[in-house]
Image (cartoon, helix red, strand yellow):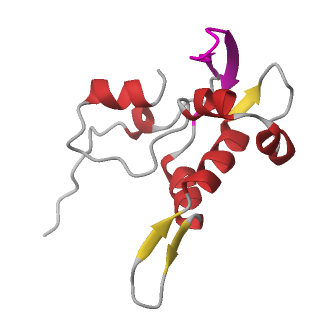
Amino acid sequence: MASEVKSTFDFQKYVISTDLLNKTVKIEETGEEFKVKVKNLSWSRKNQIVAKYVKWSTDGISSFNTEGYMREILKEIIVDAPWGKTTETFLISIDGRLGSALEKIVPIAFEDSTIPEDKKKESNGT
C-alpha cells in the first residue's frame, strides 16, 4: 500500500529571479569603470548555449568555441549598457581591452565542482 508523502521541498527558492543585476565592469588597462544591467540566465538556457558551441569530430573528440559562447552569452544577458543593445556588430567592433572586461561577467561554461565558491565568484566578475 502506497502512502502519500508530503514534501516540504520548496522548489521556488531555486527558480531564477527576474530582477536585473547591476554589474560594474572595469577595464584594467585604463582603470575606467561603467555599469551594465544583466539578467539572470537559467540553468537550461546556459546549457543550450554551451551545447551550441560544443562540436564533436567523427573520432569522438570534442572542441569548444569559447569566443562564440562569450558573444552569445553577452548578447543574452546584457539588457542595459552605455552602448545600447549588445549586438554581434558591436561585439566584433570592440578591442581586447573592453572584450576582456566584458568576459568577466560571463558565466563559466563548464563549472568544475572542485572550484571553491569564492574562486567561481571572482571568475564571474561578482
Q: Quadrant of residue 113?
A: top left
Residue lying farthest left? 1
Is residue 123 positioned above or below 73 on the image?
above
Which region shows up in magenta? Answer: 21-40
- x 75%, y 30%: residue: 79
Is 46 or 116 nearer to us in this picture?
116
Instruction: Give the image location of residue 52, x and y in percent.
Output: 59, 66
Image quadrant in which the N terminus is located: bottom left
Q: Is residue 38 magenta?
A: yes
Asked whether, in this view, residue 19 is left or right of residue 81, the answer is left
Instruction: Give the image location of residue 97, x and y in percent.
Output: 65, 27
Instruction: Give the image location of residue 87, x and y in percent.
Output: 82, 42
Q: Determine the main secondary structure of the stretch shown in magenta.
A: strand
Is residue 24 positioned above or below 83 on the image?
above
Residue lying farthest bottom? 58
Asked whether, in this view, residue 101 is left or right of residue 43, the answer is right
- x 29%, y 40%: residue: 9
Instruction: Give the image location of residue 34, x and y in percent.
Output: 69, 12
Is 41 or 103 nearer to us in this picture?
103
Q: Is residue 112 magenta?
A: no
- x 48%, y 38%: residue: 15
Is residue 73 positioned above or below 53 on the image?
above
Q: Quadrant of residue 117?
A: top left
**Tag count in the figure?**
0
- x 22%, y 56%: residue: 4
Is 62 or 96 nearer to us in this picture?
96
Is 21 or 75 nearer to us in this picture?
75
